[in-house]
Amino acid sequence: MYDKLANDLNIKFKRPGLLLVALTLKESFYRLAVYIWAKIHKIPVQWVSKGKLKKMEPNLTPKAKGGILFPTAGIVSPYEVTLALAENAITNGVKIAVNTEVIDIIVENNQVREVITNRGVIKTKFVINAAGLYADKIAEMVGEDTFTIRPHAGTILIFDKKLQGHYNHIITRIPLKVDPRTKGGGAAITVDGNPIWGPNFRENYDKENYSTEKEDIELVFKKFSELLPKISKRDIISFFTGLRAVAELKSKSNKNEKESDFIIGPTKIKGFINVAGIQSPGLTAAPAIAEMVVEILRNEGAKLIPKKTFNPVRPTNPRFSELSLPQMDEMIKKDAKYGNIVCRCEKVTEAEIVESIRKGATTIDGIKFRTRAGMGRCQGSFCLPRILKILSRELRITPEKITKRGGNSYIVCCETKELRRQNIERN
Ligand SMILES: Cc1cc2nc3c(=O)[nH]c(=O)nc-3n(C[C@H](O)[C@H](O)[C@H](O)COP(=O)(O)OP(=O)(O)OC[C@H]3O[C@@H](n4cnc5c(N)ncnc54)[C@H](O)[C@@H]3O)c2cc1C
């Protein structure tokens, strides 16, 4: 499904393949078992001998005894997919209410009627509960108290692009036991060429705690440097921690909670559909989940008529950094802002930043996710003040009002002279 989506939406999608590597005798034995299991389940798989493995991945540890390759495993950028789908939906007439919090849901005669938000009331007969970590709270609003969402943290390390080509597949060790809570992570390469390692798995029952612990970084680095020992910690340019929304079903006594698979389906409240507990691999499964939800909506009584004018294609401009020199010249002749490189690491131009603001970016991260400005080696220390100025100019607001990611994540508080004046007044 992703091949068609990527083509229509102009998003980057690569299939580097997943390479499972055996480092010990026990793993070599399991390697055979996994290979046979994949063959039985008709999953495309290839046996990789020690010699072939060395040719495929010369920087792999010499301890590698052989591997198996799942050639169809692919990679996309989660934020590129999300933004592309949202842009295409808007083009086709969908209204997206951002910064809008659902506070309550009104049910009458066992049927959904209204959604109360902090920005007004939405009258509707159907609600799809896809609220991630807060799907349990949304379900409680209609009296569906059947599951709890437990956040489970996972840390990912991002490496410098200069390592591009150091390895070419998604690589991990042969698993000796299957943990349903995690696929075990891997050493992958983003669609933009940064090696990434992780995630690990840590229980963390705070839905707002995205902090990264030193131990998480150590653990992830140790796990994958056993496979790729030439990569140094100094090549890490950034790291982050995400929270998986793991659903736990409540038993009738509400005492024993049992970890659950995705919870997708109608509920006892007509028109209220759960798409909850979408932990990993939720991004991979999303297009298939969407098709399931269409059928559920139909069964719930929604009249779904295919839109004749629906346009699945999202036109995009190629990134300036990916153009040839004559093409770059051509662009600069058309718009001089292409001649001003704002982010040096990722070679992002002023014209691309202005374009992303016109497409809806209002924060520093909004620009970062659309253009990659700030994602390079220096992590925005050069371009951040410049982007702040452009945002301020284009949105016609003062820099103090600009945030990194909405809420209270302000970047600057006031001008230095103003700060001095305030201090004098206070003293
Ligand atoms: C570290 C990590 C690694 C992962 N790796 C992979 C991978 O390799 N492959 C893969 O397929 N998947 C992966 N996943 C899983 C994938 O990211 C998730 O499955 C996916 O993001 C879930 O999407 P969702 O739309 O269900 O939830 P979310 O993306 O969490 O979206 C839920 C939305 O609901 C909003 N919301 C919540 N409450 C309210 C409210 N009251 N009012 C209004 N809005 C509300 C939130 O703001 C949020 O925008 C990974 C996840 C993590 C954490």
Image: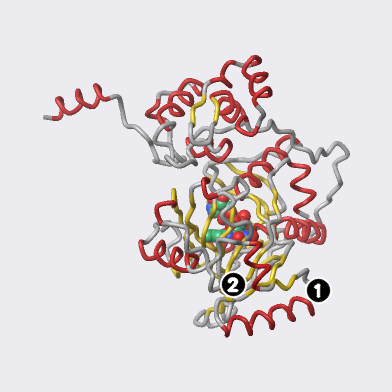
| Residue at image location 88% in from the left, 39% down from the top | 308
Q: Amino acid at mark 1?
A: Lys
Q: How is the image coloured?
A: secondary structure
Element under disc 2: loop
Front disc: 2 or 1: 1
| Residue at image location 54% in from the left, 31% down from the top | 348
**Does label 2 point to a residue whose CB lies under 8 Å from ligand 1?**
no
- Mark 1 Cα within 10 Å, few/some/many (few <14, many 20+)? few
User: Is residue 296 shown left or right of residue 211?
Assistant: right
| Residue at image location 42% in from the left, 32% down from the top | 384
Q: Amino acid at mark 2?
A: Thr
Residue wearing tag 2: 146
* Quadrant containing the N terminus in the rendered view: bottom right
Q: Please say if 392 is above or below 322.
A: above
- Mark 2 Cα within 10 Å, few/some/many (few <14, many 20+)? some
Q: Earlier in the sequence, mark 2 or mark 1?
A: 1
Estimate the x, y position of residue 426 in percent, counting from the top left.
15, 29
Task: Please name whichever residue, 17 or 426, is drawn nearer the observer in this view of the structure.
Answer: 17
Can the viewer see residue 139?
A: yes
Estimate the x, y position of residue 217 in percent, counting from the top left.
41, 61
| Residue at image location 70% in from the left, 37% down from the top | 90
Q: Please say if 418 is above or below 71.
A: above
Ligand 1 quarter of the rendering: bottom right
Residue wearing tag 1: 42
**Does label 1 point to a residue whose CB lies under 8 Å from ligand 1?**
no
Element under disc 1: loop
**Residue 324 picture quarter:** top right
* Quadrant containing the C terminus in the rendered view: top left
Task: Please name whichever residue, 38 or 180, is drawn nearer the observer in this view of the structure.
Answer: 38
